[in-house]
Image (cartoon, rainbow, N blue to C red):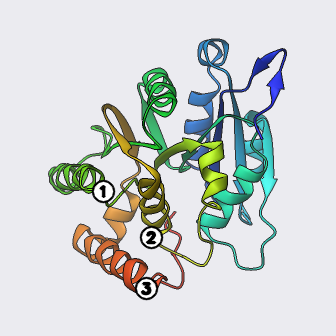
Amino acid sequence: MPSVINGELLKFSIIIPVLNEEKLLPRLLKQLTENDLRKKNNYEIIVCDGGSNDKSIAIAAQYADKVVLDKSSKKTIAGGRNRGAEAASGEILIFLNADIFLKNFSVLLEETEKGLSGKYFGITSKIMVHPSESKFSDSIFLGFYNRYFRFLNLIGMGMGRGEFQAVRNSTFRELNGFRENLAAGEDFDFFRRVRSLGPVLFLKNVIIYESPRRYRKTGHFKILLSWLLNSIFVIFLGRSLNREWKQIR
């Protein structure tokens, strides 16, 4: 439940599930712990580790307010998000992937609070690859999918990629969080259920930069096919096609 710290209600809990992310996790955590951001915004940082055998836990301990270990027998990113949420004290839960970089983070916080204080039940945004790493194929692929995901929210399907999803703490608990039996498509499933409660806001003026490592290793077409098939399985069979979402580091 939301906590009062120094007489002020804790506004945000930022939850980051991690598995062997020593290369990219420091970039995000350094950004989140900038002094000006912490002074202007009331948030905690929670890292949930799913069994890393690199330096991820030690890195998280340097920056995060809470480091949680996922001791589930079958670990999934859904389970990591749920364990982090169980430790959260904020009114609003913000789920971020460890391999992202944020543009306009202050705007993200401001617009998220504004949206969830109004008529919206979930917040998501545009996902891109940073210009310094982006290829033309990335821009075409993600440009299409950002428009498509926004359209899904407008017609009532609900969609928000796991790179950035935000909901009220109370909404998360009402929905019993992410479904841990889903190795893939858990973000799609969660925001489908969020959308069943009310509208989702797609932030057009906020960009989340993701790592292109999966696109480089797997290719855009295979990722597109995987997203499509997993979404079909989630909708019609209540499970994901993939039994495991393989690490690419």
Q: Is residue 223 visible?
A: yes
**Which residue type does callout 3 highlight?**
Leu
**Mark 2 surroundings within 10 Å by alpha-carbon count, few (fewer than 14), some (14 through 19), many (20 or more):** many
Residue 172: x and y in percent read 62, 52
Q: Can you tell which quarter of the image residue 159 is in?
A: bottom left
Q: Which residue is mark 3?
A: 241
Residue at x 44%, y 31% (from the top left corner): 115
Label 3 crowd bin: few (<14), some (14–19), many (20+), radius 10 Å: many
Q: Amino acid at mark 1?
A: Gly
Query: What's the residue at 68%, 59% (across, down)?
Result: 82
Q: Residue at x 60, y 59 (%)?
A: 175
Q: What's the residue at 47%, 61% (across, down)?
A: 193
Q: Residue 163 vs residue 212: left or right?
A: right
Q: CA distance from mark 1 to mark 2?
A: 17 Å
Mark 3–mark 1 distance (CA, rounded to whole Å) = 23 Å
Residue 65, image x, y percentages: 78, 35
Q: Is residue 60 left or right of residue 109?
A: right
**Mark drawn on residue 81:** none
Quadrant of the image occupied by residue 102:
top left
Badge 1 is on which residue? 156
For marks 2 and 3 on the same chain, the one whose residue lies earlier in the sequence: 2
Point out which mark residue 185 bears.
2
51 is higher (above) or lower (below) than 161: below
- Position of the N terminus by quadrant: top right
